């Protein structure tokens, strides 16, 4: 074993340290959202933009699945696609995300078209898809390891949104109910996978860098919301206050 190779527990500690420093739970927009400081327009813009992230997840998982040579790995990984797409129309995580945007009063066709999403959201999502397509498979798998950290941010966000926004109900946030259990299952698999397949220190460093990349992608999406909606300067073609509840209340 090369002297500089990290043990499994050292690698895990390095990965957890990436999350402790860079995960989007630390972002000012996330803190604003969970503490009730977001305007209704900001909550709507968050949901509308994040739809594009939700929609890309089964596509990125299909890229990874197609590259796995081992049937056991494929059987485990394909569950992620089912979780988001469902077995039938109207089932699965993406449908539940649309329930969230429905409850906020957003038009489905507008949300799914991505027409009013911020340019940085689109760049971030595209770069995630390109990353898992173009980088070595172990790095692509490693980029999903933000799910090591998602159960706690989901809990804090969901509790905060329910406590602080009277238009948000448990049904609105039903998407998040299953995620902590699914995220634990998925991140256990991904952590075991990268631990087994990153065999050199350079490969281990690339796995850590992949997780840093993914954290930066999630961070960028919240930077874009902060810039666009807190400084009130969204991209001209993006979602504006008039596209949301304010407009419907005036009608
Ligand atoms: O609510 C969140 O903060 C959050 C974060 C993440 C994440 O850290 O990537 C995911 C999710 N949610 C999520 O719902 C989800 O399905 C998901 C899949 C993945 C992935 O990279 O495969 N991350 C996440």
Image: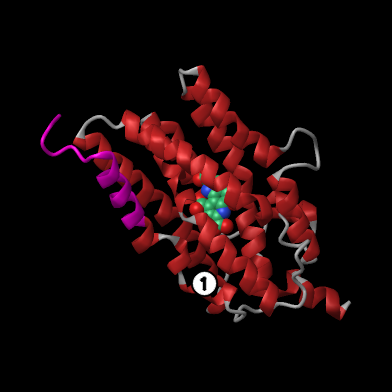
- Using the image, determine if residue 238 lies above or below residue 131: below
Which residue lies under the disc numbered 1?
Answer: 29
Q: Is residue 67 magenta?
A: no
Counting from the top left corner in percent of width and height, residue 19 is at: 38, 57
Instruction: Name the residue rendered at 32%, 41% in the picture.
Output: 207
Q: Nearer the viewer, residue 10 or 146?
A: 10
* Residue 197 image position (x, y, % from top left): 33, 29
User: Which quarter of the rendered picture does the N terminus lie within?
Assistant: top left
Q: Is mark 1 within 8 Å of ligand 1?
A: no
Q: Residue at x 54, y 41 (%)?
A: 185
Direction right: furthest residue: 251
Q: Is residue 86 left or right of residue 4?
A: right
Q: Residue 159 at what x, y percent from top left? A: 63, 70
Residue 26 location, x and y as percent?
43, 68
Q: Write down the region rendered in magenta.
A: 1-18
228 relative to 99, above or below: below
Residue 119 seen? no
Quarter of image, res 22:
bottom left
Q: Is residue 230 left or right of residue 251?
A: left
Q: Is residue 200 above or below residue 181?
A: above
In this rendering, position of residue 140 left or right of residue 58: left
> From where the camera sits, is residue 90 visible?
yes
The C terminus, quarter of image: bottom right
């Amino acid at each position: 074993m090369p002297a500089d190779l990290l043990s499994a527990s050292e690698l895990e500690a390095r990965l957890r340290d990436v999350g402790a420093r860079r995960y989007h739970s630390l972002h000012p927009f996330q803190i604003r959202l969970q503490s009730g400081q977001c305007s209704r327009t900001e909550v709507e813009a968050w949901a509308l933009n994040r739809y594009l992230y939700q929609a890309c997840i089964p596509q990125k998982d299909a890229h990874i699945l197609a590259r796995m040579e081992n049937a056991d790995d494929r059987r485990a990984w394909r569950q992620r696609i089912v979780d988001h797409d469902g077995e039938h129309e109207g089932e699965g995580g993406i449908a539940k995300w649309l329930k969230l945007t429905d409850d906020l009063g957003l038009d489905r066709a507008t949300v799914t078209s991505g027409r009013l999403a911020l340019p940085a959201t689109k760049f971030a999502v595209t770069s995630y898809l390109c990353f898992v397509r173009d980088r070595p498979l172990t790095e692509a798998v490693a980029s999903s390891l933000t799910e090591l950290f998602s159960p706690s941010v989901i809990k804090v966000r969901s509790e905060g949104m329910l406590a602080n926004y009277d238009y948000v109900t448990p049904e609105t946030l039903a998407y998040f109910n299953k995620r902590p259990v699914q995220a634990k299952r998925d991140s256990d698999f991904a952590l075991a996978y990268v631990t087994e397949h990153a065999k050199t220190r350079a490969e281990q460093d690339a796995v850590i860098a992949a997780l840093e990349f993914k954290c930066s992608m999630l961070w960028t999406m919240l930077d874009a919301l902060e810039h666009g909606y807190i400084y009130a300067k969204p991209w001209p073609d993006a979602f504006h206050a008039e596209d949301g509840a304010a407009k419907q209340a005036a009608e």
